[in-house]
Image (cartoon, rainbow, N blue to C red):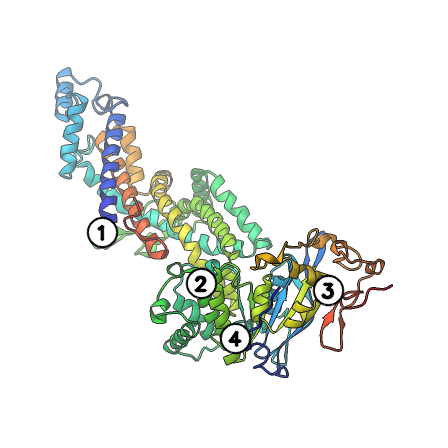
Amino acid sequence: MTLFIFRRVLQGALVIFMMSLVVFVGIYQIGNPIDILINPEAPPRVRQEVIERLGLDQPLPTQYLRFVLGALQGDLGDSYVYNVPAFSLIAKALPATLELAFAGLLLAIVLGVPLGMWAGYRPEHWSSKAIMGVSILGFSLPTFWVGLMMIVIFSVELRWLPSGGRGETASLFGIHFSFLTWNGLTHLLLPALNLALFKLGLVIRLVRASMQEVLKQDFIRFARAKGLPQRVVVGVHAFRNILLPLTTILGLEFGSLVAFAVVTETIFAWPGMGTLIIKSISVLDRPVIVAYLMMTAFLFVIINLLVDIAYSLLDPRVRLGEEQG
Amino acid sequence: MSAQHPPSAGHTVAETAPLALEVRDLLTRFVTKRVALTAVDGISIAVRRGRIMALVGESGSGKSVTGLSIMGLIDPPGQIAGGEVRVGGQRFDVTDDRQMRRLRGNRLAMIFQDPMMTLNPVLRISRQMTEAITTHHPEVTRAEARARAHSALALVGIPSPRERLDNFPHQLSGGMRQRVAIATALLNNPEVIIADEPTTALDVTIQSQILYEVERVCETHGTAFVWITHDLSVVANLAHDVTVMYAGRIVETGPVRDVLENPLHPYTRGLIDSVPDIDIRKGKLIPIAGMTPQLADLPQGCKFAPRCPLRVPECAAEPPLVTRADGRAVRCVRPLDTEPPR
């Protein structure tokens, strides 16, 4: 187990290094931030001064080396726009995004697993067919459109829920969260639901397919032959086996939830990383974009490691050890 | 074939012991929108306490469906369309799932063919065993259930049962897993155990060990077994009685020695002649010509007639199962011990 984690950390470091290279080189091919940052009528002297201050006069390898050396010390450069460390900007916006992503994931699981299990247990029932129909809508309707419709219906017409922002937050371990206050929760619900919708469709389909697969197994018949009530056969014997594929998929999908949050955050004015990154892209605030992408890569690596560990806890047949690369 | 009978079988258990299981006119159909196929057509069997009844036939003869029907474990589109099941003289409605659930794993247990697939891969052995007790006897404490699981494992010859209880199925070999399944079936000391080819997937050495354990359980606990198999050598060594099925029907039934040494039905004869003999001087195998008929396409009259080497014009009408004075029963217009006409 220790060896396994050690290897995965090394792999993760490699992935992040490669990512930094791709991101850094890629982002420096796009546009010129000077044109956006500085008034075009500014005298060339000022212009030159800014270019030198930001280190943009250096050749790309030198700039990259500087970035890596800084990154190793936890310094991802200063934002061109806010003139504060890019990392602190990201770190400030991260909790809001993670809160939204987790809320979306939670909704997808809490709604998707029971619905998927039912649809797999009684595939011929009319309600199962309805569930499957809705799940198709879940991942065929564009997220931004659904988000706008939600605002139109629940905020504008019905006036049940607020249309944007985080609302009141309360502090936990020095980090502000919306879900701790009632007002914050009402603000969280719509964006979380919007973000969850796509994953909900996925979870329903995955759970239904796994359920149908598992129910055919001999051990289910054996469990029934023991005289167990159906709720134990399905809720324990089948459910425990469904958790395995579900964990793998959800782990992978959590990363994309964070990424998808960009759209949802923009629609609901949710002050998370997504809102920040969209602003930063529009003004070519390179350090912030790079810091965001590095943070996302880092999240993916961490999540994958956690999924592997969770998998070994759920499936006794998986041993994290020498036989695994 | 040389049916060497163990001295124990058939003699130690009184043939007048009370009936543990009685099945009458069992009828199981598979109904789809287009057709209704009858997989089990009026099967009746009776097994006394401490006796082993073998249910034999080719694949597709309906023997497994019979076992599942008795347990009430037929899934749609299958349905039990008629018949009754009595356990210990008490009548049960096979179509009533609540009733059958209380019976299953308690008074009527079942073990399955593939031990690699029978146990849930993600649950510990202890959990999978103790739940069989606590679901029927909620008053039993965890520790007590575990102790009973422990002694059941020891009973079927599992070494160091205490450690095995904490194992997951993948840590056990196929033979061990089948013993766990048998031990689980034994937990509530059932009157009847239905065994659906439980040794087919195992090595012959493991198979004989398990057969030995089963025989012991049968004698010491007075458990009745319905042993579904296509392996006549197992039948010869283990069972007291045998019922031969063909196309969802019983074609012959009787005490194992009588049936194997003097079969009455040509199909039984064919099955016996198809068994390879370890004695190489015995000559060639004689296979039964043709294939088991499809349920959707059963012949008129005697279902075996198209494959029967001895068929006569009278076979065009299906003969009834006739019970004879010696207690044997056969479904044939001209059983093998009748003198050929002319």
Nearer to us of marks 2 and 3 is: 3
The reply to whether callout 2 and callout 4 are in contact (CB within 8 Å) is no
Residue B105 position in % (x across, y down):
52, 72
Q: In this view, does A257 lie above or below B174?
A: above
Q: Which is in the foreground here, disc 4 or disc 3?
A: 3
Q: Of callouts 4 and 3, which one flags the residue occurring earlier in the amino acid sequence?
A: 4
Q: Mark 3 points at which residue?
A: B265
Distance from Cα at disc 3 to Cα at disc 1: 67 Å
Q: What is the CA distance from the residue labelled 2 to the residue labelled 1?
A: 34 Å
Mark 2 and mark 3 on one chain: yes
Q: Position of residue A49 (x, y in %)?
A: 12, 21
Tell me the residue that label 1 is attached to. Answer: A2
- Which of label 3 and label 1 is nearer to you? 3
Instruction: State the residue at coordinates (31%, 39%).
Output: A274
Report how far apart the C-alphas of labels 2 and 4 lie in the structure. 24 Å
Does residue B42 appear in this view? no
Output the chain of dot 4: B
Q: Earlier in the sequence, mark 2 or mark 3?
A: 2
Mark 4, Cα crowd under 10 Å, few <14 / some 14-19 / many 20+, is many
Look at the image and tell me in which quarter the C terminus of chain A lies: top left
Tell me the subunit letter for badge 3.
B
Residue that numbered label 2 is attached to: B175
Assess whether mark 3 and mark 4 are in contact (beta carbons under 8 angstroms): no
Q: Which of marks 2 and 1 is in front?
A: 2
Q: Three-letter amino acid code at disc 1? A: Thr
Q: Say above or below: A193 vs B54.
A: above
Q: Is mark 2 on a helix, strand or loop?
A: helix
Q: Mark 4 points at which residue?
A: B106
